[in-house]
Amino acid sequence: MTDSAADDLRDRFFSLRPGPDPEESLVDRRARFFAELAAAPEPLVLPATTRLQGLELCHGPSARFRQLRFIDAAHIDATVRDRFARPSHSLPELAAVFVDPEELSYRNFESIVCLDRRFPSKQVGARVRSGKSLLGQGTRSMTLEAAPGLAAFLQELDGLDLYLPPQPARARGGRRFIFHCTGLAASLTATLSKTMSAAMRRGFVTVNPVFRCNRFDPGDDRFLAHFDSPYRDAARGHVSRYTLLIYLTGGTGPATLRVGHRSLDAIPAMTTLLLPQKLEHEAGPYLDGPKIVLRSELIYEGKVGEELDSDPDIARIFAKACYLDRESARHPELARPAHRAYDRAAAARWQALSADPARSEPFLRKRFRGLDFLANGHDYWFLLRGPSLIECAAITVLDQLAASLHNIPFSRQCSSEVLTGDGTDLEWIHGALRPTAETPESPLLPVLDKAALFPPLERPTIDDDFPTSPDFRADPFPSSRWDPSRTPSIQDTYADARDYAGARILPAPILALGQEIFLDPERFVVEADRIHLLAPEQLEPLHFAGAVFYGPHDFIEVEVELQAPRLLLPPIFFRRVPVEGGELLHLGLDLFRNDWMVRAQPQRVPVPRITDRPRDADPEDQPWLTAAGQARSQAVQTELAQHRAARGAATPGQGPGAPNRGPGNR
């Protein structure tokens, strides 16, 4: 498809208006638009317009790019930025992008808009009038009276046109958008602190600056009964205890809010409620107009030994909920069990973990290169008949993090189907993985010789004669016999690029080159029943400086480009279980332990090589620097200086592919 087709679909999408049926909202029209694209005999195929933090973005909708998001346009590549629509007249800095929901992972699952700059600087105070508790059970009911500046900010939220369907839509109803606003949190924190009882104020820190603005129109589905997932930050010692609800509009409807065993059929505008998060609640639309509700929570200093302790059983359920929620983009039938798992994990924080009445649970049986495995977001099962322990651990990581290698999501490199069974029944697990006619590839994930990426340099020449500018001489090169691969200054620049690439490639346990995925077994350390992935702390982006004259960088091109995900993960638990005719391998990866900071971010690393540049080459064309995506930065000069200092102190042969300079040469 051409860019014009994407432009046309973009324009058609944003020209949609609510349908003639009063119960068909704009969200309904947009959902129908996506459904029509997917149902076409030959679904439209649009290429990605650009990428951002590993996620492909398209400026037009399609059967693949079927989820709308809003991001700061400044983060989009300037060469394609103007192709993306700016549908919010009040926030023209926000661009509308379309993403493939199957590519989403834990690092980009939520779409949060920053409204900090929009919050007014004056008249943002408020007061509350406490009233009779409308719902009892430890709840508080108030009316918020906002100063003009704050009132205007709250009333304009609905008109920003940032609403998106919630996930999962059928369980949550209506539409919503999530935003961050420190100023609003500070104003509400100050207001609520003045009215709290001494008991409620004890340990109170702040209102969470991340808010959800929900809108329900008459006829929308209800937000099903649920417990709010708690906020917890073990590093800061913070937990949430109360949900904050501010009703920006008033209205009536049957059980428009139910908390525990009591419900409300009418809610006046600006009603403000504090609900203990241990209470189950549900909500429905008004009958007489839109219901617009602002939601956040109150953050407290957590109690060590109670609220801040990690519970592996709860973490396991929450991990399954997140995984099933993500996989529901491909298998919609998983949305309901995901909702139940979320709710069960949230409720378990306040009461003993309830026994699951159903022993059966959903699993995904996936096939990668002929290998079948079962996954539920925490537990992975393999039948050991070919793949190694390290290969199974790598597949677990790639699937759990929804890794995208060579711009192809791992999920799209697998086939998958939903199975339901008892995860404790080894016979059922063995049957689900029983050998098929297809034999897994061997090796499933080959090993890459990293040292071969950085071959030794040639013996340098004695002199360092170098081309001048083509603006000064028709032939700026020293002679026809001039060899850039033996020129000392070019070798030094190559060494800089080699060290830059090596610092990112050598520590990586998993690499992608072209369509192939490689392992480095030395970065997987097996100890007892744990597998540790060795990886450094996440590095910050670095930038190089360019040149106008011919310089050493002009003779450094890209040999290959690899993808090396930067990983910081907890250990992977494993056990081997003998079964009839083989052996099962059970792996567990708990991403939600509160004593681990989980990080996973893709990075592209160009491997350098010295080239014999054509004589009409543009001195400003520097292939390796371009591939590295580097700009002028003092930070990279510091890193290069450190590499040079380290090389000066190293003995010959140290470092990746150290130059073979020979005796008598520098």
Image (cartoon, rainbow, N blue to C red):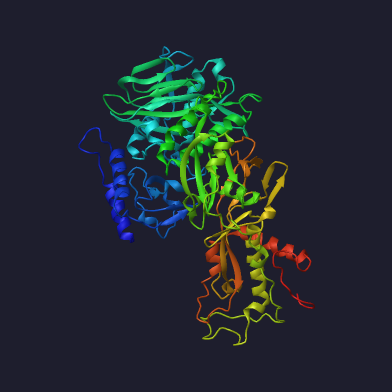
Q: Is residue 286 above or below residue 572?
A: above
Q: Is residue 205 visible?
A: yes
Residue at image position (41%, 60%) is 79
Is 193 on the left-hand or right-hand side of 32? right
Q: Is residue 379 above or below residue 441?
A: above
Is 156 on the left-hand or right-hand side of 204? left
Is 222 on the left-hand or right-hand side of 587? left
Residue 291 drawn at (x, y percent)? 33, 27
Q: Is residue 631 visible?
A: no
Residue placed farthest to the left in the image? Answer: 20
Residue placed farthest to the bottom in the image? Answer: 480
Is 453 on the left-hand or right-hand side of 159? right
Residue 77 drawn at (x, y percent)? 44, 57
Q: Is residue 69 above or below residue 264?
A: below
Query: Which residue is at the front of the view, 337 or 15?
Result: 337
Q: Quadrant of residue 604?
A: bottom right
